[in-house]
Amino acid sequence: MGAARNRAFGVDPKRTQRYNLRQARYDAIASDIDALAGQAAQAGRRLSVLDIGCGRGTAAAHLSAKPNFGMIDIDATETDPERKYKKLDTSLYRSILYGDLTKGYPELRSCSYDVVICEQVLEHLTDFDVSIETIFRRSFTSP
């Protein structure tokens, strides 16, 4: 825990301040998803999460610090596997799909995720119709 105390929310080594607004959003998302994972575990199932535009894996890093992380299956999407600036810990994900959200990710089944994370993505798009429909269509699994 010593080294983690010098990280924002104990997970981000690039942000040594203890509080960071961007990290606070990810921590809040992770806390909510962790609670849902706990409920799923009590019901005898795993929580399925899709992280659209996973970037460097910030959402998954925050989730991995939560107590119910072992009950979460995370799939991710990203635009390009060749982006050199990204250092993505792929071990946190069940699978990663590289593609364009504005094309709709036809590879992913409809209604296959309990939770869809789409943090810091939409502001980079110019066409929202297919993207929003895709986010809606991938979520809402049956309880």
Image (cartoon, rainbow, N blue to C red):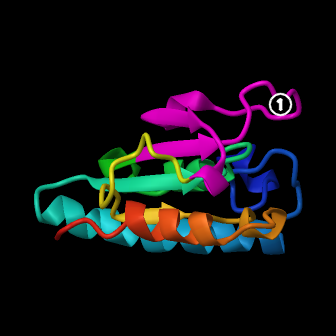
Q: Residue at x 52, y 29 (%)?
A: 91
User: Quick one: label 1, few (<14), some, or many (20+) residues within 10 Å?
Assistant: few
Left or right, 30 with reference to 57: left
Q: Which residue position holds label 1?
A: 83
**Residue reaching furthest left?**
44
User: Percent position (x, y) of residue 112?
Assistant: 30, 55
User: Percent position (x, y) of residue 102?
Assistant: 65, 56
Q: Which of 116 and 1 lies nearest the eye of the viewer?
A: 116
* Residues rendered magenta in the picture: 74-103
The quadrant in which residue 108 appears is top left
Left or right, 105 with reference to 125: left
Q: Residue at x 59, y 74 (%)?
A: 28
Residue type, numbered disc 1: Arg
Quadrant where the image shows the C terminus: bottom left
Q: Is residue 22 above or below residue 64?
A: below
Q: Is residue 91 above or below residue 27?
A: above
The quadrant in which residue 139 appears is bottom left
Q: Is residue 42 above or below residue 59?
A: below
Q: Is residue 106 above or below residue 126?
A: above
